[in-house]
Amino acid sequence: MSSAAPLKILVVDDDPYILMSLEFLMKKNGFDVLVARNGTEALDIIKEQLPSIVLLDIMMPDVDGYQICAYIKSQTILNHCKVIFLSAKSSEADIQKGLDLGASLYITKPFSTRELVKQVKQLTADA
């Protein structure tokens, strides 16, 4: 990453502990972090802020992560946006569905925070 403004990352999860820890982790690594506690909030933030990366849970009470990913990938203005699913859904079918919708990565919970940061940095290296 150059000395330009930090990249915006949106963290979407309905678990407040995961949300807080990911927000802290990404801020510590130099990203401008936005948070959403549910899918509806995430869609509002995405439309207003146009984040570069969305760390996205799948199972949420209102709009699920698959629907959010499909929305992002359908919007030309969000072509730059990379989606990383962070989900407890670990079946091959779930992972394939996420990748088919256009996600750059699908990481199953629990995950290594060090590995997550490494993968986010790799994804943003060419952003």
Image (cartoon, rainbow, N blue to C red):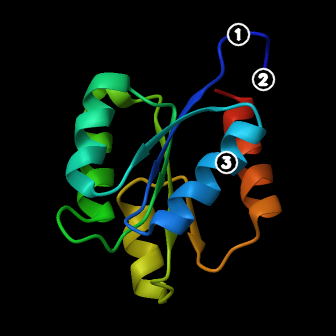
Measuring 32% from the left and 62% from the top, which residue is drawn there? 65
Which amino acid type corresponds to the residue marked 2 in the rendered image? Met
Mark-to-mark CA distance, 1 and 3: 21 Å
Mark-to-mark CA distance, 2 and 3: 19 Å
Specify few, some or many for label 2: CA neighbours under 10 Å numbering under 14, 14-19, or 20 or more: few
Which amino acid type corresponds to the residue marked 1 in the rendered image? Ala
Measuring 68% from the left and 44% from the top, which residue is drawn there? 26
Name the one closer to the observer, 8 or 101. 8
Specify few, some or many for label 3: CA neighbours under 10 Å numbering under 14, 14-19, or 20 or more: few
Q: Which percent across, then down, holds residue 74? A: 24, 40
Q: Using the rendered view, name the quadrant where residue 35 is placed.
A: top left
Question: What label does residue 4 carry, if any?
Answer: 1
Q: Is residue 1 above or below residue 62?
A: above
The quadrant of the picture occupied by the C terminus is top right
Q: Which percent across, then down, holds residue 55? A: 51, 52
Measuring 26% from the left and 55% from the top, which residue is drawn there? 39
Q: Which percent across, then down, holds residue 14? A: 37, 66
Measuring 61% from the left and 26% from the top, which residue is drawn there? 7
The quadrant of the picture occupied by the N terminus is top right
Dot 3 falls on a residue whose secondary structure is helix
Name the one closer to the observer, 94 or 89. 89
Question: What label does residue 16 carry, if any?
Answer: none
Q: Are marks 2 and 1 in contact (CB under 8 Å)?
A: yes
Instruction: Classify residue 22 as left or right of residue 97.
Output: right
Which mark's residue is nearer the viewer, 1 or 3? 3
Specify few, some or many for label 1: CA neighbours under 10 Å numbering under 14, 14-19, or 20 or more: few
Disc on the earlier residue, 2 or 3 = 2
Which amino acid type corresponds to the residue marked 3 in the rendered image? Phe
Q: Which residue is mark 2?
A: 1
Instruction: Classify residue 38 as left or right of residue 94.
Output: left
Mark-to-mark CA distance, 2 and 1: 8 Å
Dot 2 falls on a residue whose secondary structure is loop
